[in-house]
Amino acid sequence: MANNLLKGKRGIIFGALNDMSIAWKVAERAHEEGAEFVLTNAPIAMRMGAINELAEKTGSKVIPADATNVEDLENLIKESMEHLGGKIDFILHSIGMSPNVRKKKHYTEINYNYYNQTLDVSAGSLHKVLATAQKMDALNEWGSVVALTYIAAQRIFPDYNDMADAKSLLESITRSFGYHYGIKKKVRVNTISQSPTVTTAGQGIKGFDEFINFSEQMSPLGNASAEACANYCISMFSDLTKYVTMQNLFHDGGFSNTGVTQQVIERFGSED
């Protein structure tokens, strides 16, 4: 149900690949709530996805940009402000990629060139987005930046590989840049730590389907869906959360605070 929570707000949404993407769901909900925004992704990702379909559905412009390239980001922000007619109110960073995961390299035997790519694409890109936006004075006061993360930043999930390191860095950048941006422009920066979610990126992780099932049984409320995550993002972009910043916000049905559930205990109980 739409409540015009983002009426009059302008934004940039990174990472919508197809209708399985959380960023795609966020774009749909932002449109329903009255926002205007630009969609962006790396040129190679855009060729793989269906972003133009989403743009048509939401009346949005698509501006290709490599989020690891500062020149691309400068052009993206400049064109976005021109197209939208003013400064930006919200940014979604939904970007993650690991060549080591794709190439099935074990964490203890990763390729370090790939590792640097993982960190740059999945975390360093947030720093570059924030630094470029600040340099260009692109975000309005009380603007909101949200990046998507995962609990593997705090706990070991073996097959999440070097993406866990990248998410740890992403969350650290959120705290550090959130402090400086808050002091300077009252811009808030947060991460949302989402339940394991069926997306194109997530499906590339070994044992992902089994882990989704385990997480469902370990979460008192069950796994949060992509649609539910989109709703949470909308609340973070709205004025209802103006004083929330530098936080890692768990959106996982209670998984992050659950030691064990009765359902899991029973699966491992004796059959005597």
Image (spheres, rainbow, N blue to C red):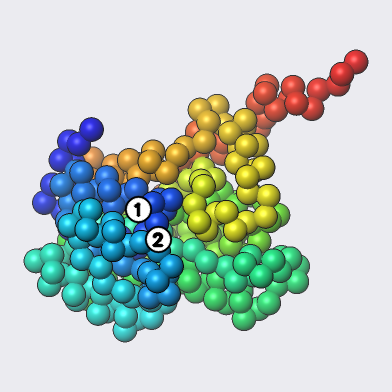
Q: Amino acid at mark 1?
A: Trp
Query: What residue is shown at x 20% (from left), y 44% (from top)?
Result: 32
Residue underneath mark 1? 24
Q: Quadrant of residue 165?
A: bottom right
Circle 2 SS class: loop
Query: What residue is shown at x 39% (from left), y 38% (from top)?
Result: 228
Q: Nearer the viewer, residue 57 or 146?
A: 57
In the visual, does 226 lie left or right of 244? right
Q: Are marks 2 and 1 in contact (CB under 8 Å)?
A: yes
Crowding near pointer 2: few (<14 within 10 Å), some, many (20+)? many
Residue 147 image point, x, y percent:
40, 57
Query: What residue is shown at x 48% (from left), y 58% (from top)?
Result: 171
Residue furthest to the right in view is 272
The numbered disc on residue 224 is none
In the visual, does 101 lie left or right of 15? right
Q: Nearer the viewer, residue 101 or 93?
A: 101
Residue 156 image point, x, y percent:
67, 51
Vertical placement of residue 263 versus 224, above or below: above
The numbered disc on residue 17 is 2
